[in-house]
Image (cartoon, rainbow, N blue to C red):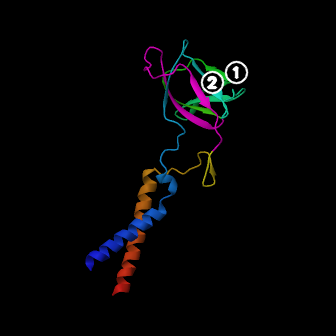
Amino acid sequence: MKLLGHVRRFLIVGATLGLMMPQVTFAGERTNSPIRDVALQQGSSLRGEVLSMQGQRSAGKTISLATNGEVVAKAVTGADGKFVVSGVTPGVYSVVVDNTPSTVRLWSGAAAPPSATPELLLVEQEPQVVRGMHGDHFPQWDHPLLVSGLLVTAGLIGGIIGYNIKDDAS
């Protein structure tokens, strides 16, 4: 009988914690694509092309190159949908076109792995709306203080419910 009471309390705490966690927590990564390796061309330039979802070349699109949340370079596609960003140093960057980010790892020509492409191909995508939110307006659910607070709150609620169940059984 005592074991059943412990199991019941465990299930109550687990259910409470499950209800408190947002679905976004279990959705996994929100990235559109994995990190792609790109070899820089002569003059430390990043070359690429932007296509629409239908495969048409996209002219006049602004491409932003950012690292650590800071935009370090911008370029605009020409009539052929191609762009060039000069003076780029090797490293990991976020390339954004029409609010759609892609993560790329840029390599100098000599150090690039065999899988690195000489040009970056970007495909425009429609903005995704998730549960009525647009873009990256999600709270930071992986922040340690928030997770700790949620766990403590779930434990308190579960303990209160368990204590009240114990009183009702007496």
Q: Quadrant of residue 169?
A: bottom left
In the rendered image, the residue lying farthest to the top is: 42
> Where residue 67 sits in the image (x, y, percent)?
53, 31
Q: Please, what secondary structure does the residue beneath circle 2 have?
A: strand
Residue 80 - label: 1
The residue stretch that appears in magenta: 98-127
Whether residue 155 is visible to the viewer of this picture, yes or no, is no
105 in the magenta segment: yes
Main structural element of the magenta stretch: helix, strand or loop?
Answer: loop
Q: As displayed, is residue 5 above or below residue 29?
A: below
Residue designated by label 2: 49
Identify the residue shown where x is 46% and y is 50%: 143
Q: Please, what secondary structure does the residue beneath circle 1 have?
A: loop
**Relative side of 19 to 8, left or right:** right
Identify the residue shown where x is 30% and y is 73%: 6
**Relative side of 169 to 33, left or right:** left
